[in-house]
Amino acid sequence: MLTTMPCAAATGARAATHCQPRRRQAACGASSDTQGWRMRSGDVSASFTSASSRVSLSSRRAERGPRMPQAAEAEATGSTAGHGESSIAGVGESSEPLANPVPTPRRAVLGAVAASIAGMGMGTWSPLVVFAAAEDAAAEAEVAASTSSYLAAAAVRREGAVLITGANSGVGFSAAKLIAAQGKRVVLACRTEAKGIAAAAAIREKVPGARLDVLPGVGLEMTDLRATGDYVRAFQDSGIPLDVLVLNAGIMAVPLGRTEQDHELHFGVNHLAHFLVQDGLMPQLRMREKDTGERGRLVSCSSIANTLPNALDVTDLDWRRRGYNEWTAYCASKAANVLMTDEVARRELTVASNSFHPGIVTTNLVRYILPDLTAENRDPTAEKKTSNGKLLAKLGIRGADEGAKSHVWLSTATEAGDVSGRFFIDPGVEYPGATRAQLVAGGDWFLLTGKEPLAAQLRLPESLFDWRTQANAAALWERSVEMIQPFRV
């Protein structure tokens, strides 16, 4: 998947840190602190090494050739406690600088190449690069060829991943599959490592060669903030660049229950755990803009159920004072999803932050209310040909792949990176603001446009979003930070 070029001119039995082309020896000093990190992608294991290294290249001045620039310092940490260590030859060793070589006019070529590499700003994905100065054309060609290979590998390393929570079932699984089918790298953040591995295998059956990652030895357990923090830390340690964070996992209409930290389950899983994930990974999302010029993306799966009046109470997020209702609790948590992305949009100029309604999707999410419509009890492909299947489609009930359309659009479409702080009900379709034709086309025929009789007098559908205020978003943010504080990474 990702390759690391340890040294520009090292081949065969040469020492990787000290490249020694013919006649002259390169002047280079390198020190590094290297840690190994092993990642499992499905049933495939690969070893990656990231290094914190400083490379200096020097030469004589003026009449004997141009001075080679100093390579930029690259820093990275890549270890997960308890998961073993590995290394790649040539990375992670240290040595004292050798004597300066006698420069030649050809050093100008090498200097230009080194300047180009240093100017790329490789950040945490810069491997140890050592350029050899050579007098003869053969050795110089060897350096150029190796440098070309390094640049090609660097372009691959710059492409970050799309991390999807709850990627082992339902619309999360479909989103991972469809995004991987576009050639994107996808991190499957599932409740256990085993679920992630099984999901990776299932996706590869549909998308051979899919670029999938499952973090080893850790799962994203969202009923326990301590375990959630462990997953965030493991991802940070992995060194994987993050382009898009999709907050998809969730529960719906479950009986009253509490998380390990005694938060109501809908609030704790659907909002608070995801709040901790985005809090810990926001620095990685910001880096995308710095490294590529494109904004990072935060995508949150909400629901049109967030419009239930009086569901959200920012003074009673854990249902201590109010009488519990599983539907109201679910709707409140979905409103919290929108408020969080709205607040991120206000705080983070380099991150596009949006939420969306996936539609009425018959996945395992509905197991408590419509058990006969869960994905495991249905064959959506065959169902489409039946009269009942056609009726369900007309009613706006979607299968998982169709329900993942907005996941995919917000994660990958160029135009989706230009908007922030929006709530979508279909790719490119905001709500309120959708036309009747757009609602019918998307299967959301039951929603109001504002053109209906008495809609204007009742301020519909705008009044359904009266909870969506900056004051509520700020209050929710403040309370959420207080609740996750002991577990922040």
Image (cartoon, grey):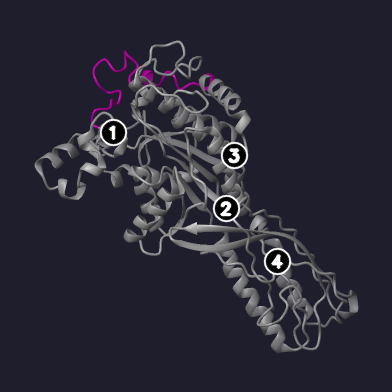
State the CA–CA distance, disc 4 to disc 1.
51 Å
State the CA–CA distance, disc 3 to disc 1.
30 Å
Which residue position holds label 2? 241
Q: Tag on residue 92? A: none
Which residue position holds label 3? 280
Q: Residues within 10 Å of mark 2 (few under 14, many from 20)?
A: many
Which residue position holds label 1? 366
Which residue position holds label 4? 128
Q: Mark 4 or mark 1: name the one nearer the start of the chain.
A: 4
x%, y% of residue 31?
79, 63
Is residue 41 shown above or below 428?
below
Q: What residue lies at 60% left-to-right and 65% top-to-bottom? A: 154
Magenta-colored span? 445-471
Taking the magenta stretch, the answer to whether it contains residue 469 is yes
Amino acid type at circle 3 is Gly
Q: What residue lies at 59% left-to-right and 39% top-to-bottom? A: 280
